[in-house]
Amino acid sequence: MPELPEVETVRRELAPVLARRRIDRAEILDARLTRPIEPGWVASELRGESIVAVERRGKYLIVRFGSGRALLVHLRMTGSFRTALNGGLEPDSYRRAVVTLDDGADVSYRDVRRFGTWLLVEPDELDPYLAIRVGPEPLEKAFTARFLRDRLAGRTAPLKAALLDQRSVAGLGNIYADEALWRARLHPRREAGTLSSAEVRRVHTAVREALEVGIARQGSTLRDYRRPDGAEGSMQDEFQVYGRGGEPCRRCRSPIARLRIAGRSSWFCPSCQPAPR
Ligand SMILES: [Zn+2]
């Protein structure tokens, strides 16, 4: 599932293709993408819109239009974009939408498992929609150690589960949460509310480092995630713990272990990240 670094990589590659262009044609091929809104209506509303910016909040892509409206895209499990700068997209049985821009470029959206969403929002709807779902951007100033401490305080949930709450750390998912906890040397099952101030500061720094490495490697290529130009990211070669069960910890050589937390696999080093008593 694409997380902040993967979505940011998509944003950086889509922005130069989409910005300052007008949508000449839009076709939505799967009603699930826009439900409960009728896909034909969304497609006709997109036609003629001029694109002023492509932004990101957490795992959401935000395509901002000259009208003040925005298209909010969530890739969920397997959503991705492909661009064909001179038109002529390759056939793709997983294509769910295509827009053609006024310079002839085609931008298609593919989604194997079909959990992704396209939501067209009115100018006054965007901020309230995001405000209740997504906390501060972890790589921006508003995400402070103090903010994180307040979010974790009093919580009995496992630390890993608490970090996956998008209102605590926007854009963090299973991969980068495991990577951050390994960097912070904290066990994923630690009770979130029991962290000392120093431990919270470690998590705060580790989250930022893990996400920054992910962005620098242009995201990880897992299953169906690809960059819009079809290239693969390289982050999967850099994982310290994620998916490395049984392999040696890069710090202490102990075998990486795996357990399930909140229904998701978690990888960690049992020696660097001691279990809570
Ligand atoms: Zn270790």
Image: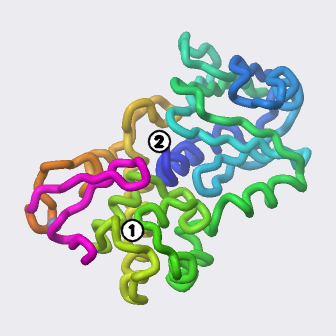
Tell us which disc is closer to us: 1 or 2: 2
Element under disc 1:
helix
- The amino acid on which the numbered mark 2 sits, given as a three-letter code, is Met
Say whether residue 265 is magenta.
Answer: yes
Q: Position of residue 209 (x, y in %)?
A: 39, 68
Secondary-structure class at tag 2: loop
Number of the label disc, if any, that sits on residue 171: none
Q: Is residue 251 above or below residue 80?
A: below
As for residue 192 lying within the magenta part, the answer is: no
Q: Residues within 10 Å of mark 2 (few under 14, many from 20)?
A: some
- In percent of the image, x 27 and y 75: which residue is there? 276
Q: Which of the 4 image quarters holds residue 14?
A: top right
Q: Quadrant of residue 144?
A: bottom right
Q: Residue furthest left?
A: 253
The numbered dot on residue 209 is 1
Taking 60 as reference, is 28 left or right? right
Q: Is residue 46 left or right of residue 53?
A: right
Picture quarter with the C terminus:
bottom left
Identify whether 9 is placed above or below 111: below
Q: Residue 170 sits in which quadrant?
A: bottom right
> Viewed as shown, does residue 267 lie left or right of 131?
left
What's the amino acid at mark 1? Glu
Locate residue 133, reporting x and y percent. 68, 58
Q: State the scheme by which the image is colored.
A: rainbow
Classify 10 Å Cα crowding around label 1: few (below 14), some (14-19), many (20 and above).
some
Instruction: Provide the residue span drawn in magenta.
Output: 254-277
Spatial CA span between label 1 and label 2 = 20 Å
Q: Which residue is mark 2?
A: 1
